[in-house]
Image: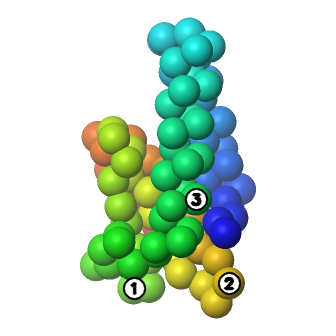
């Protein structure tokens, strides 16, 4: 199972909104559906990501043009942020 922080939920909504405006409803639904499925897969195999050396305990993994930052907890993973790969990641995580 995975949980989104408030900031990650805002990231997810922003991804949907941007895709909706640029490519339409069908593509926005498709992309965010694939992202949700990927997050479910990640929750079942959290160690497929790699450690993010800037912040101890934080993992990262790429999904298409986004990078997912998360921590592994006892019963789930906590998604901290979902950022576009061109963003300055440390600036948005710290």
Q: In this view, does 72 lie above or below 40?
A: below
At horizontal 60% and vertical 42% (from top left) the residue drawn is: 12
- The residue lying toward the viewer, choosing from 25 and 93, is 25
SS for callout 2: loop
Instruction: State the CA–CA distance, disc 2 to disc 3.
Output: 13 Å
Coloured how? rainbow
- Badge 1 crowding class, 10 Å Cα cut-off, few under 14, some 14 to 19, many 20 or more, is few
Q: Which of 78 and 2 is in front in this view?
A: 2
Circle 3 is placed at which residue position? 40
Question: Nearer the N terminus, badge 3 or badge 1?
Answer: 3
Give the left or right position of residue 8, taking residue 48 as reference.
right
Q: Position of residue 80 (x, y in %)?
A: 56, 64
Q: Residue at x 64, y 89 (%)?
A: 74
In the picture, residue 64 is in which quadrant?
top left
82, above or below 1, in the image: above
Return the residue at label 1. Answer: 56
| Residue lying at 64% horizontally and 54% vertically, measured from the top left | 7
In the rendered image, which residue does mark 2 sit on?
75
For marks 2 and 1, give the one nearer the viewer. 2
Q: Is residue 30 visible?
A: yes
């Amino acid at each position: 199972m995975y949980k989104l922080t408030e900031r990650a939920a805002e990231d997810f909504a922003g991804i949907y909104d941007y895709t909706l405006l640029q490519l339409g409803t069908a593509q926005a639904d498709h992309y965010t559906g694939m992202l949700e499925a990927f997050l479910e897969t990640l929750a079942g195999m959290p160690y497929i990501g790699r450690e993010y050396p800037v912040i101890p305990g934080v993992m990262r993994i790429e999904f298409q043009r986004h990078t997912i930052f998360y921590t592994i907890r006892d019963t789930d993973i906590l998604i901290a942020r979902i950022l576009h790969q061109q963003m300055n990641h440390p600036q948005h995580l710290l």
